């Protein structure tokens, strides 16, 4: 579906960000409390900044990000 394609593109984009900082330990799922199997880092693409676990939430829970970011990612992915 078109919606799942949007989520997939966002996850791919978020995972390709440049690491600008990392935190000690692992991220925890805020809904289940379980440890997420990835190091918690802070990412950027030069315009936006995000935590690395945001991709996890978009992928697992279909977290909806801002419309501005969604449009930005879809536009960047076409280039």
Image (tube, rainbow, N blue to C red):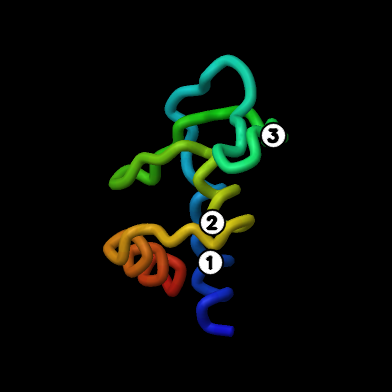
CA separation in Å, label 3 and label 2: 16 Å
Q: In terms of secondary structure, where does tag 1 sit?
A: helix
Q: Nearer the viewer, residue 55 or 28?
A: 28
Q: Are marks 1 and 2 in contact (CB under 8 Å)?
A: yes
Residue 63 spot, x, y in % from top left: 49, 58
Neighbour tally class for label 3: few under 14, some 14-19, many 20 plus, Cα within 10 Å: few
Neighbour tally class for label 1: few under 14, some 14-19, many 20 plus, Cα within 10 Å: many
Residue 18 spot, x, y in % from top left: 47, 38
The residue under the point 50% across, 50% down is 14
Residue 37 spot, x, y in % from top left: 72, 35
Q: Judge left or right: residue 78 versus residue 9.
A: left
Residue 57 spot, x, y in % from top left: 55, 50
The residue under the point 29% across, 46% down is 47
Residue 34, disc: 3
Quarter location, residue 28: top right
| First along the sequence among labels 3 and 2 | 3
Q: Which residue is mark 2?
A: 58
């Amino acid at each position: 579906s078109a919606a799942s394609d949007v989520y997939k593109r966002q996850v791919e984009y978020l995972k390709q960000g440049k690491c600008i900082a990392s935190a000690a330990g692992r991220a925890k799922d805020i809904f289940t409390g379980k440890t997420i199997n990835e190091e918690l880092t802070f990412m950027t693409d030069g315009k936006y900044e995000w935590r690395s676990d945001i991709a996890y939430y978009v992928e697992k829970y279909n977290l909806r990000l801002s419309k501005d970011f969604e449009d930005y990612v879809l536009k960047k992915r076409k280039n």
